[in-house]
Image (tube, rainbow, N blue to C red):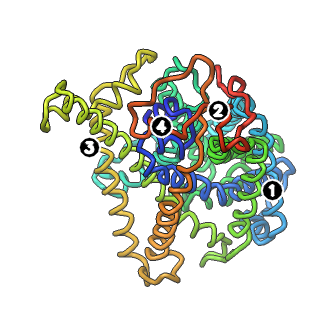
């Protein structure tokens, strides 16, 4: 909700949004948010390529048959740099083609991909439930929806759940800020956020039910399978499970190809959002869109190559794993938490400034009671409950932003670091790719670098994407009085070479 509201008001990507909402000195926070998402995109393009490869293997029948060893298939693929790079390249190419022409093209591609994704998942779910019910039970479905109340007292369960929720909903990645740039002025931000969460959770439930039902139907030790990690389940266990689907030769083919095609669609939609986030920031600062798309695509491909080919090792069970890719995930994955903290900081700052201004004007009481009455709800009152929403957001949202999120941030980061310190050998050794020092080193270097670059960011004009009739006042925001903030298409004296040709009206999402 916060990201949608901020992007809709600022009409810019992450850098511009923090420049406007948090103030000129904090534009680097938007750069951090963009970098974290893009850095994740470097290796996520590789993972997306894996799903395409397995769709190709599934539809060709290479994963079915009694003599197929899924571990050998996985190892052979991961240890073949040419194949991994080829499918990584195909993913990047598909993503660039989808976003080349702007927001309307992205909307259309995402619409068809999501419809196809749901259709394929329902097909897989139907076949999985058929398999699970073949012995007169629905063990997989019952397992998924059976609550072990004792587990609710385990902190790790809550930590893992919160982490997964943040990941799957792209919280803190800046993607909602980016897509909100294209919203109509009267578009319902709350409904959009609710719909996104509902769609994400629906897909997760359908996929989880399909996977567990299939595994419990054919595996004599399903619990050992489902605790083997996501990559092990996806690329090792599921092909073995789907190969035993009913329907002769057609059933396994449908399940294998359908599942991995659905997984490919999900991965590509995520990559589209990642690339568009980066491109939006370039366009906001006067760069040509098509050139920005090309530069971003090339960067994601090149910087993703190490994750594709470096440090491919075998674990104790003889299964190949990409250690360099895992190190990148180790470094940048939890960086999203700081992006979320920066968003919360912008909200806190706006509320405090508005309250202090009213205190100075004599229209609001001083002290904690005054701040709680005016400052805490300021962002919600001014940017969420704007009169365009079918759903009103109440005080509970303020509690989440001002109290729950800081507590969750401390708990998640603290538990993550504590677990690492307790269970990692040589945790403070900077050369240890799984240690704590390497994370703090990379985070520190990136943060300091971006703080230094801040003065160059704010010296450059910022162009807001304002569709006709969607102009809104930003003067009350901390960065709203910035003399270098203009509307997209304006020609700025001294910066004529930055005037963008992107048509604003065609960029607007209308449905």
Q: Nearer the viewer, residue 295 or 240?
A: 295
Pointers 3 and 1 in contact (C-beta within 8 Å):
no
Between disc 4 and disc 3, the foreground one is 4
The residue identified by callout 2 is 488
Q: Secondary structure at mark 1?
A: helix
Q: Secondary structure at mark 2?
A: loop
Q: Work out whether mark 2 precedes mark 1 in sequence or the reverse, and give the earlier one.
A: 1
Residue 467 relative to residue 288: left or right: left
Q: Is residue 329 above or below residue 395?
A: below
Q: Secondary structure at mark 3?
A: helix
The residue identified by callout 1 is 89
Q: Work out whether mark 3 precedes mark 1 in sequence or the reverse, and give the earlier one.
A: 1
The residue identified by callout 4 is 3
Q: Work out whether mark 4 precedes mark 3 in sequence or the reverse, and give the earlier one.
A: 4
Q: Work out whether mark 3 precedes mark 2 in sequence or the reverse, and give the earlier one.
A: 3
State the CA–CA distance, disc 3 to disc 1. Answer: 44 Å
Between disc 2 and disc 1, the foreground one is 2
Residue 285 makes an appearance in the image: yes
Q: Nearer the viewer, residue 64 or 315?
A: 315
User: Which mark, by number, is residue 11?
Assistant: none
Between disc 3 and disc 2, the foreground one is 2
State the CA–CA distance, disc 1 to disc 4. Answer: 31 Å
State the CA–CA distance, disc 2 to disc 1. Answer: 32 Å
């Amino acid at each position: 909700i916060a990201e949608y509201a901020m992007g809709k008001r600022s009409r810019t990507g992450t850098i511009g949004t923090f420049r406007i909402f948090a103030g000129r000195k904090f534009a680097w926070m938007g750069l951090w948010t963009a970098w974290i998402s893009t850095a994740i995109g470097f290796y996520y393009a590789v993972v997306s390529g894996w799903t395409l490869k397995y769709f190709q293997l599934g539809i060709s029948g290479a994963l079915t048959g009694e003599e197929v060893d899924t571990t050998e298939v996985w190892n052979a693929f991961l240890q073949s740099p040419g194949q991994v790079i080829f499918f990584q390249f195909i993913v990047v190419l598909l993503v660039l083609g989808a976003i080349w022409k702007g927001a309307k093209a992205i909307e259309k591609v995402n619409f068809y991909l999501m419809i196809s994704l749901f259709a394929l998942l329902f097909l897989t779910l139907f076949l999985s439930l058929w398999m699970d019910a073949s012995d007169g039970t629905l063990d997989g479905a019952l397992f998924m929806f059976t609550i072990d109340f004792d587990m609710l007292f385990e902190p790790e369960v809550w930590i893992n759940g919160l982490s997964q929720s943040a990941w799957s909903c792209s919280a803190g990645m800046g993607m909602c800020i980016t897509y909100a740039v294209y919203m109509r002025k009267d578009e319902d931000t709350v409904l959009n956020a609710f719909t996104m969460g509902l769609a994400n959770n629906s897909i997760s439930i359908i996929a989880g039910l399909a996977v567990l039902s299939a595994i419990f139907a054919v595996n004599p030790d399903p619990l050992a399978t489902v605790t083997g990690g996501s990559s092990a389940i996806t690329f090792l266990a599921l092909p073995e499970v789907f190969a035993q689907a009913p329907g002769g030769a057609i059933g396994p083919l449908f399940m294998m190809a359908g599942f991995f095609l659905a997984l490919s669609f999900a991965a590509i939609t995520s990559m589209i959002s990642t690339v568009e986030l980066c491109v939006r920031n370039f366009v906001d600062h006067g760069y040509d869109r098509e050139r920005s798309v090309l530069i971003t695509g090339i960067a994601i491909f090149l910087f993703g190559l190490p994750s594709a080919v470096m440090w491919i090792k075998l674990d104790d069970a003889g299964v190949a794993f990409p250690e360099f890719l895992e190190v990148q995930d180790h470094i940048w994955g939890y960086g999203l938490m700081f992006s979320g903290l920066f968003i919360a900081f912008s909200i806190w700052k706006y509320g405090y400034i508005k309250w202090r201004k009213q205190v100075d004007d004599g229209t609001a009481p001083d002290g904690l009671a005054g701040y709680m009455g005016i400052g805490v709800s300021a962002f919600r009152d001014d940017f969420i409950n704007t009169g365009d929403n079918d759903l009103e957001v109440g005080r509970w949202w303020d509690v989440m932003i001002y109290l729950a999120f800081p507590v969750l941030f401390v708990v998640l980061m603290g538990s993550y670091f504590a677990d690492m310190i307790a269970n990692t050998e040589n945790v403070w050794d900077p050369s240890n790719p799984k240690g704590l020092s390497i994370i703090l080193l990379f985070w520190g270097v990136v943060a300091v670098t971006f703080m230094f670059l801040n003065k160059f960011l704010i010296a450059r004009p910022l162009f807001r994407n304002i569709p006709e009739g969607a102009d809104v006042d930003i003067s009350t925001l901390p960065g709203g009085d910035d003399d270098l903030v203009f509307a997209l298409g304006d020609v700025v004296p001294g910066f004529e070479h930055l005037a963008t040709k992107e048509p604003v009206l065609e960029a607007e999402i209308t449905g």
